[in-house]
Image: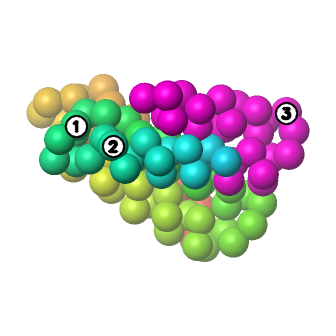
Amino acid sequence: MIQNNLGAAYWTLAEVKDKGGNLAKAISAYGEALRIYSLEEHPVDYAMIQSNLGAAYRSLAGITDKKGNLTKAIHAYEEAIKIYTSAKYPLYHKRVIANLELTRQMMR
């Protein structure tokens, strides 16, 4: 969970300085967190981290490799909604779906 929190800190720091560098660090930290929090063993944590990863990639798409980073963001959001179903987690499902739709619109 420390890696997830570190990712969140870098994502926040990216709003004030070195946006690309700090987003890259956030993405790396989220990736490290996903090495522990797998879909099978920790599904809710996995979904949360995937949602965070999607947000970081979507932000990075505003700086570099728009199509590639938006594609990665979409994949991360799709991973999150595997767990955040409308039946079990309606609020989280709604948020991730909204982020997914926004990201898909940005691809156009």
Give the label on residue 36, or none.
2
**SS for dot 1:** loop
- The CA span between labels 3 and 1 is 32 Å
Of the residues tagged 3 and 1, which is closer to the observer?
Answer: 1
**Mark 1, residues whose alpha carbon is within 10 Å: few (<14), some, or many (≥20)?**
few
**Mark 3, residues whose alpha carbon is within 10 Å: few (<14), some, or many (≥20)?**
few
Residue type, label 1: His
Circle nearer the N terminus (2, 1): 2
Residue placed at 67% from the left, 69% from the top?
A: 66
- The CA span between labels 3 and 2 is 29 Å
Magenta segment: 1-24
Q: In this picture, is 19 found above or below 75?
A: above
Circle nearer the N terminus (3, 1): 3
Q: Is residue 74 left or right of residue 64?
A: left
Of the residues tagged 2 and 1, which is closer to the observer?
Answer: 2
Q: Where residue 56 sits: x, y (%)?
A: 59, 47
Q: Is residue 8 left or right of residue 24?
A: left
Q: Where residue 10 sits: x, y (%)?
A: 68, 36
Q: Where residue 105 sits: x, y (%)?
A: 53, 61
